[in-house]
Amino acid sequence: MFFWILIGYLSLLIILARVFSKKIDGLNEFFLASRNLPAWVATATFVASWIGAASTIGTIDKAFSQGLSAFWYMAIPSALSLFVITFVFARRVNRIQALSMPQAFEGRYGATAGFFLSSVILFASVTLLASQLVAAGQLIHTAADIPVEWATWLTLAVIVIYSVIGGFRAVVMTDVFQVALLGLGLFILFAFGMWVGWPHMEAGVNAMIAGAVASAATHVPAEVAHEALVDPTQFWNPFVELPKHLMITATFILGWCIAPEMWQRMQAVANPDDALKVGLGSIASTMLLFLAIVFTGISAVGALHHLGITVQDGQNVLFVLAQQLPNPFLMGLVLLGGISAVFSTIDSSINISSLTLSHDMIQRYLWPRATEQQLVLLSRVATVLVGIPSVAIALHFNDIIQVLWISADIYASTIFVPVVALFYCPQAPRSCGVWAIALGLIPVVFSFIAEFTSLALPPWWPEWPYTTLLGVSMSVLGFVGAWAAEAWLSKPMTINQ
């Protein structure tokens, strides 16, 4: 039955894209919806692009195994990141007339910095896209009994089709539908989990500590799940492993408060006041969703224990709890809500990847005299092309968290410092941007190669999340060092010298 519900959902996404699409006469429409989105629509697409696989599937799994400390997994880092986006960047980003972040960088730091940034964003966004494709393939495989490879390609095909049809506006309008579906699905699962599970929480937590449930929790082996569960009270302790969680939160903020997807949405509204409204609305909406997500995972401990259900290896708690709903239609809505969370993140990553490849790289360096219509066609082709390497990465690594944090490391280590300086340090020399990106990229490259090859790093090399701070420190060193070098070279030479 769910297979046909899924087909109807996928068909509806394409229909929505076709119905709400406008005539695309240039890149400003294809990538920014002509910069005239209503604030509430931009808020919906902002939230939809933020709440993805890690925020839903991953956070519910964490809350199921670790209790209140799961708030540190995505909820608290997201809240703090959104505050930074809203009160530090939103108005300033909206005032920028450049079509993309690399174009703004080129105007401030020069062509080399623009090229470096384009390369970094393309790699990071393709990697982020891969992490969401992993989740989509696994979720559709589990829910509709479709092979993972086919489910992954089906996901990509549908999203590429509606993205090609309407560009960013199609992404936005499907996001509005999908975030509503996500909210409905979460409300259903949250209400069911609290109703059935809350009276049985003590028994469920004790059973988990005894090893009846934790040893089979998806993505959380028993030895990891029990780290935070020394006794029943630890399940309700939000400060378990606080130093580690604070460090992870810091790296998350550095990586995602300047993500190009968020930059794009702040530019897509008409004025700075609307950009601020988008930020404020996103904070409120996202925090409500995270409250439901975390307490759904927590209540699942009591609910599944009471129902005598064990989460088997390879399953996720969201799917297992949804299966216990008394009505197949309600189960279908919950599963579609989970799929919507993933789809609405994938389409944003595809659109940003296409913008970077077509406008910031091909047009800038290979086809500078292309007409607007030629560039729109190029952007549609790029939308198709960027998905292919993402599927290859997704099918190879098949791990949401592993792939997701690669993107976060890349953004934090290379982009954060020059983006802040773009708005708050206008007197810095142009070379600072190039050196900040170049030096910040060094730890990322070495960590990435070591992660997936046999390369042995030095004994003093930090582990994640400290590698991110190393990258940010290197970026600061590059920025400040270039500034100091420029100042020294520009000093007038005296005869004695």
Image (cartoon, rainbow, N blue to C red):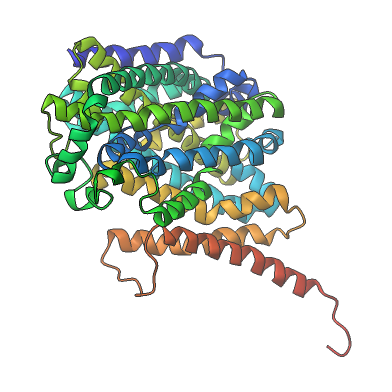
Percent x, y for residue 410? 46, 52
Residue at 24% over, 29% down: 300
**Total tally of numbered discs in the picture:** 0
Residue at 45% over, 55% down: 247
- Does 106 sit left or right of 358 as displayed? right
Q: Is residue 119 visible?
A: no
Percent x, y for residue 34? 63, 22
Among the 4 quarters of the image, the one containing residue 325: top left
Residue found at the very far bottom of the displayed protein: 496
Residue found at the very far right of the displayed protein: 495
Q: Nearer the viewer, residue 279 or 302?
A: 302
- Does 390 sit left or right of 47 as displayed? left
Q: Nearer the viewer, residue 316 or 125?
A: 316
Q: Quadrant of the N terminus?
A: top left
Residue at 53% over, 41% down: 81
Q: Nearer the viewer, residue 78 or 458?
A: 78
Q: Nearer the viewer, residue 121 or 406?
A: 406
Residue at 51% over, 47% down: 253
Among the 4 quarters of the image, the one containing residue 99: top right
- Does 399 sit left or right of 213 as displayed? right
Q: Is residue 7 visible?
A: yes
User: In the figure, 83 relative to 331: above or below?
Assistant: below
Q: Quadrant of the C terminus?
A: bottom right
Percent x, y for residue 31? 56, 28
